[in-house]
Image: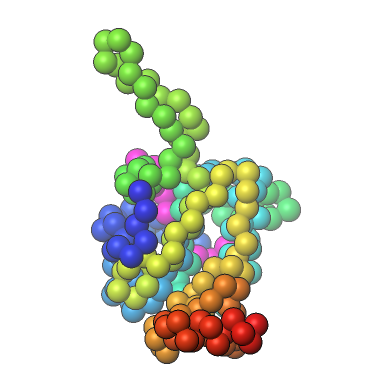
Amino acid sequence: MAIVGKKFPNVTVDAISEMGDDLRINILEEAVSKGKKVLLFWYPKDFTFVCPTELHAFQAALPEFEKRNTIVIGASCDTNEVHFAWLNTPKDNGGIEGVTYPILADTHRALANILGIVEQEVEYDEEGNETFSGSNVTYRATYLVDETGKVFHESVNDMPVGRNVKEYLRLIDAYAHVQTHGEVCPANWEEGKTAMNANRNSVAEYLSLN
């Protein structure tokens, strides 16, 4: 279910800080109460292979997100205890030691199921009993939420495919440009490049110059 253009679900989820403190985080409230954008990224599971590369990549880019008034939050369906163990495992051993942003622990899949990002299928036998198949963990879903709580980007990767963190910085830059200047951003737009007014003449002029 696509939620671009809509408010992010008003759901509070357990989370953990880098220091191991138990938290309760509501993405919608984080954005609105702090007047910041939020990047929420879901990954399948702690102590796996592609996942730590992504968490470290977002950590390395954290100063760039902070420059853009954006909070970064990770998420999976693991428990806070498993998150804490992973946070205390060195990078050389497949851990995420050094990650400083909070990580959601959606163990009941309350938010993940609302977003429709859990890899799970439900079937029914002749007596109406439910049977489940699938990994029951989330895909690599990413949400960008603006200062009003509105989702302005969502994407979902299959589990083997890691994300390009720079693309989310570009998307935030483009959305901020629209917010500030009221112009629209064409294909492959980057900060410092020419944008367009939303009319046919502007499009024609832009295409003639590029």
Q: Quick check: 78 above or below 58? A: above
Relative depth, front residue between 104 and 141: 141
Count up the numbered dots. 0
Residue drawn where x is 43% and y is 40% of the image = 118
The answer to whether residue 68 shows anywhere in this view is no
Relative depth, front residue between 43 and 184: 184
Q: Quick check: 126 above or below 132? A: above
Relative depth, front residue between 78 and 1: 1
Task: Look at the image and name its color scheme.
Answer: rainbow
User: Quick one: quadrant of the C terminus?
Assistant: bottom right
Q: Which residues are magenta?
A: 97-108
Question: In x, y percent, where is residue 91?
Answer: 69, 55
Relative depth, front residue between 17 and 34: 34
Residue drawn where x is 37% and y is 53% of the image = 2
Please, which residue is most extreme toward the top here?
A: 126
Please, which residue is most extreme toward the right here?
A: 92
Which quadrant of the figure has residue 33?
Answer: bottom left
Which quadrant of the figure has residue 197?
Answer: bottom left
Does the magenta run of residues contain 103? yes
**Which secondary structure is most common in the magenta stretch?**
loop
The answer to whether residue 209 shows anywhere in this view is yes
Does the magenta run of residues contain 104? yes
Residue drawn where x is 50% and y is 78% of the image = 185
Question: In x, y percent, where is residue 77?
Answer: 44, 44
Residue drawn where x is 29% and y is 16% of the image = 129
